[in-house]
Image (cartoon, grey):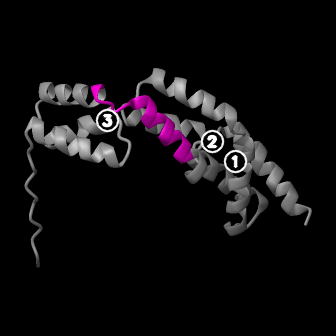
């Protein structure tokens, strides 16, 4: 039986961390929380990590507002996530509450969330296996909640979809 070898953790100097993060940020948006987590994993001291982060922000490699805009746009349009899930994920990525409110509110105002919810629930309904209307409604509501949509909107939308299915 093969024994798993524990990988040795790479440690980096502050300069190496800065260079690595510059390359990463040039390829895709990163949040300050993501950068701090990476630097911690690389074994950087907290003080050195803060200095590297300040430099990355000063040179505009990392901008939490820009990251939040790209993240919200991506999750709304491509993944079909709801407001709650997007906000909570941004919080876990280290984006401040102020930035989240500043960025997220206008993007949700532009998007009709109820219409988007109905669209993804219609798609889900086509593949859903259920034994009763109650079972289907429960599954649809649970699906919407897992995507981060408001519970009241999910219940209303599931009822509307199931009423349309019953009429066929």
Which residue is painted at 73% across and 42% down in the image?
Answer: 114
Q: CA distance from mark 2 to mark 3?
A: 32 Å
- Total numbered labels: 3
Residue 150 point in image, percent of width and height:
65, 38
Query: Hey, which residue is sitting farthest right in the picture?
Result: 167
Q: CA distance from mark 1 to mark 2?
A: 8 Å
- The quarter of the rendered structure image containing the C terminus is bottom right
Residue 117 numbered tag: 1
**N-term-proximal mark, 1 vs 2:** 1
Q: Is residue 128 left or right of residue 18?
A: right
Q: Residue 93 sits in which quadrant?
A: top left
Secondary element at tag 3: loop
Residue under label 2 = 149
Q: Is residue 22 left or right of residue 102?
A: left
Residue under label 3 = 61
**N-term-proximal mark, 2 vs 3:** 3
């Amino acid at each position: 039986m093969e024994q798993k070898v524990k990988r040795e953790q790479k440690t980096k100097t502050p300069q190496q961390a800065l260079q690595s993060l510059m390359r990463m940020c040039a390829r895709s948006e990163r949040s300050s929380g993501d950068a701090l987590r990476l630097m911690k994993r690389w074994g950087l001291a907290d003080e050195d990590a803060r200095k590297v982060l300040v430099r990355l922000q000063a040179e505009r490699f990392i901008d939490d507002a820009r990251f939040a805009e790209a993240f919200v746009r991506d999750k709304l349009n491509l993944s079909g996530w709801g407001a709650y899930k997007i906000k909570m994920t941004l919080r876990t990525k280290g984006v401040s509450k102020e930035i989240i409110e500043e960025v997220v509110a206008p993007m949700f105002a532009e998007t009709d969330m109820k219409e988007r919810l109905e669209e993804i629930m219609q798609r889900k309904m086509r593949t859903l296996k259920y034994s009763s209307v109650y079972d289907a409604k429960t599954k649809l509501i649970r699906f919407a909640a897992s995507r981060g949509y408001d519970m009241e909107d999910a219940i209303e939308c599931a009822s509307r979809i199931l009423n349309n299915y019953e009429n066929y």
